[in-house]
Amino acid sequence: MTRKIIIDTDPGQDDAVAILLALGSPELEVLGLTAVAGNVPLPLTQKNARIVCELAGRPDLPVFAGCDRPLRHPLVTAEHVHGKTGLDGPQMADPVMPLQEQHGVDFIIDTLRAEPSGTVTLCPLGPLTNIATAFARAPDIIERVQEIVLMGGAYFQVGNITPAAEFNIYVDPEAAKAVFGSGVPLVVAPLDVTHKALTTAPRVEAFRALGTEVGRMVAAWTDFFERFDKEKYGSAGAPLHDPCVIAYLLKPELFKGRFINVEIEVNSPLTRGMTVADWWRVTDRAPNALFLGDLDADGFFALLVERLARL
Ligand SMILES: [Ca+2]
């Protein structure tokens, strides 16, 4: 049995690796990719999503452009991390495969209505604008979602775009609040776990040693992506945030977490976008998310190399 997923994404080098991991994994059927404004503006994220599909040899996959700005606030981007294109690093040709005409939000709604209830998993790798917009426009689809497995938030690592907030949640906290309050089963890969998925030099070499175009691209992207985190955190490499979402679908046993209550701060100017995670269970608020905290990093990178080798 394959698991049907929609990847909602703002590529981003780590998004690109996540998409490749999904496309190299026979357990997953990617129904489509929906791009959202995030790391870079929408015209670049939808283009980057197509570049990655073509790199994977899957120009047949439908790629849709979704929302070009957060629900309420102006877009905040992260060129300081990902470069001007969002996929800086290796030289890349413009994609040839077309962008679908349908809006990404309509694709999410139509797909959830068309597929049997409880069989489609949403994998958001960027701000949650598309998902929240689909839920607001078509509340009937909410109970049809099998699960949402997303990258976002932090508890022990607190923030990366402000002292209190992780980027994906910070960009559209109103959307995150809607998704976390939707009642859909949620798995969250916060910075606490993604900061354990570090690209050390031997791990990057393992990508390069694949000897394929995919291996070379992934190595070049991680090389680029690394310089920022090495400088910022003094760490051995860069965290591969978004691939944690896909790896969780494939091998949940690589991860440990807690089923807890997670609320999103939307009002405070100081802590807007904070994921207030009740890790120590000090409130009686009902749990709404499996909040991941630990990762078998060697197992994670072994899985990545094995699956990228298939592309
Ligand atoms: Ca992303």
Image: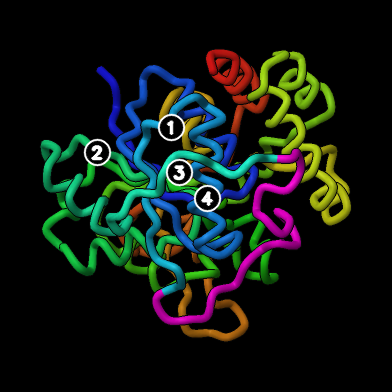
Q: Secondary structure at mark 2?
A: strand
Q: Are marks 2 and 4 in contact (CB under 8 Å)?
A: no
Q: Residue 77: horizontal and vertical position, in percent? A: 62, 67
Q: Residues within 10 Å of mark 1 (few under 14, many from 20)?
A: some
Q: Tell me: residue 53, above or below residue 232.
A: above
Picture disc at residue 258: 3
According to the picture, the residue beneath numbered tag 4 turns out to be 47
Mark 2, mark 4: which one is toward the viewer? 4
According to the picture, the residue beneath numbered tag 1 turns out to be 59
Q: Tell me: residue 234, above or below residue 295.
A: below
Q: Residue 297: horizontal and vertical position, in percent? A: 66, 27
Examine the structure image and report whether residue 182 is included in the region drawn in magenta: no
Cα distance in 3D space between marks 4 and 1: 12 Å
Residue at image location 68% in from the left, 38% down from the top: 196
Q: Residue 216: horizontal and vertical position, in percent? A: 73, 25
Which residue type carries mark 4?
Lys
Mark 2, mark 3: which one is toward the viewer? 2
User: Residue 244 or 61: which is nearer the viewer?
Assistant: 61
Identify the mark nearer the N-term, 2 or 4. Answer: 4
Cα distance in 3D space between marks 3 and 1: 38 Å
According to the picture, the residue beneath numbered tag 2 turns out to be 120
Numbered range of the magenta stretch: 71-91
User: Residue 130 or 91: which is nearer the viewer?
Assistant: 91
Q: Quadrant of residue 31?
A: top left
Q: Are marks 2 and 1 in contact (CB under 8 Å)?
A: no
Cα distance in 3D space between marks 2 and 1: 22 Å
